[in-house]
Image: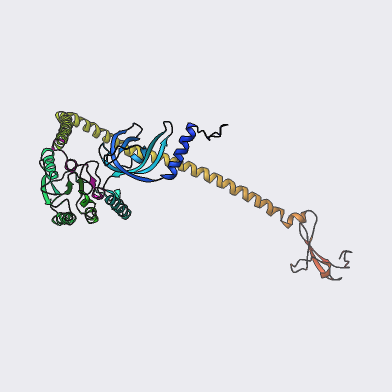
Amino acid sequence: MEAREPASGRRVWGVAGLVEAISQSLAERFSVVTVGGEIGGFTRAASGHCYFTLKDADGLAASLRCAMFRRAAAMLDFTPADGALVELRGRVAVYEPRGELQFVVEAMRRAGAGTLYEQFLKLRARLAAEGLFDPEAKRALPLHPRRIGVITSTAGAALHDVLTALARRAPQVEVVVYPSLVQGAEAPPALVNALSTANARAEVDLLLLVRGGGSLEDLWAFNDERVVRAVASSALPVVCGVGHETDVTLCDLAADLRAPTPTAAAELAAPSRETLLTELAGLERGLTLRLDHRLQSLGQRLDRLALRLARPSDALARQRRLLELLAQRAAAAPGRRVELQRQRLEHLAQRHARAQAELLTRHSARLDALQARLQALDPQHVLARGYAWLDDGQGGAVTSVQALRPGGAVRAVLADGSADLQILRVRASPQG
């Protein structure tokens, strides 16, 4: 709300307007800041948002109400607790419904770990880009290891926790310890050497890389690039159990399996002896049931075969009836075949007779037709109708008056004889 100008000329703010103006001023003045202090009254709501008070680390009477929303809280790599010294990055704001100053936290880290933590983030990003942490590169652990290698300090509690867990959970598994420093400047080369030695000997089925809890500085050897690359390139599967559940190192990310603690690493590496015995007992019951079922099935089959062998006369009677039937069929077969052939010959004879009669009829009809055509062409029939045939006396036909000369002779052939004729005169037809 804008400030009003009353008649007196003095500026009067509304509460909401003033709070909003203060909030905007703070946002402009303290857009992104980093503040350090001690956590107090930490609570996490069901929504995932976190609320706490940040007290001055030097003991001065000053505090700042803080709110960390769910998305930012999900990025935490440790569990905040009362009394913890932390560094917060965020912005100063005003909670307008109450007009209270608060700090909206966008990131939180443990105090004193700033430089190391930045190194951790940069190295993690670079190694991740190279694919050292890819899930596809992770290998499955052997289901039933017979020998497990442990890389850790012989003076630490982690080795005792691992040995105790394996003795309780899987006493059948042998343990080979590859001693190494796990803290300090000499720890990274010692860890690399232990990993190399274990892979060169190849006497174990998998490796446990373990260490107890501590600060980021205490666990820094497991963030060393040399150690991380040695873990990623190990020919033996590696289970990494470093620190507490909230501690995450780069070796955890490079290993084939991350365990929250050294004890958990031992439990994940070897199945429980009791579980294995239970599975074996189940397999034994299953095999026994299948064997009993198989024996019962074979017993029933033997019973059926025994019943068949107990009455051989029935089998002989069946075979005798079959032989009699075959003999009857064999005796009847020749006669039946002869009868079939006789019927076939009769049928063929009838077809032959019909075919001959039909052929004779067709030939007779054709001869009659040819005779009729021949008679129609016989010149004797033409002469019988009053026509005469003229030839030159030598048998040559006279077909034109051009071949005749007056005084010449021709012969006329009639139906009942011939006559010699003399030509008196020749006249050509007008058409000629």
Residues shaded magenta: 247-275
Q: Is residue 88 magenta?
A: no
Residue 27, percent across and down? 43, 42
Image position, residue 258 (x, y; %): 23, 45
Left-right relation of 415 to 307: right
* Residue appearing at x 37%, y 45% in the figure: 33
> At x 11% / y 43%, what residue is drawn?
160
Q: 220 above or below 426?
A: above
**Quadrant in the picture for residue 424:** bottom right
The answer to which quarter of the image holds residue 83 is top left
Residue nearest the viewer, comparing 282 with 330: 282
For the C terminus, the quadrant is: bottom right
Q: Is residue 338 visible?
A: no
The single residue placed furthest to the front in the displayed view is: 8
Q: Is residue 387 left or right of residue 245?
A: right
Residue 268 magenta: yes
> Up-down: is 70 above or below 251?
above
Residue in the picture at 65% in, 50% down: 369
Q: Left or right: where does residue 122 sit relative to residue 426?
A: left
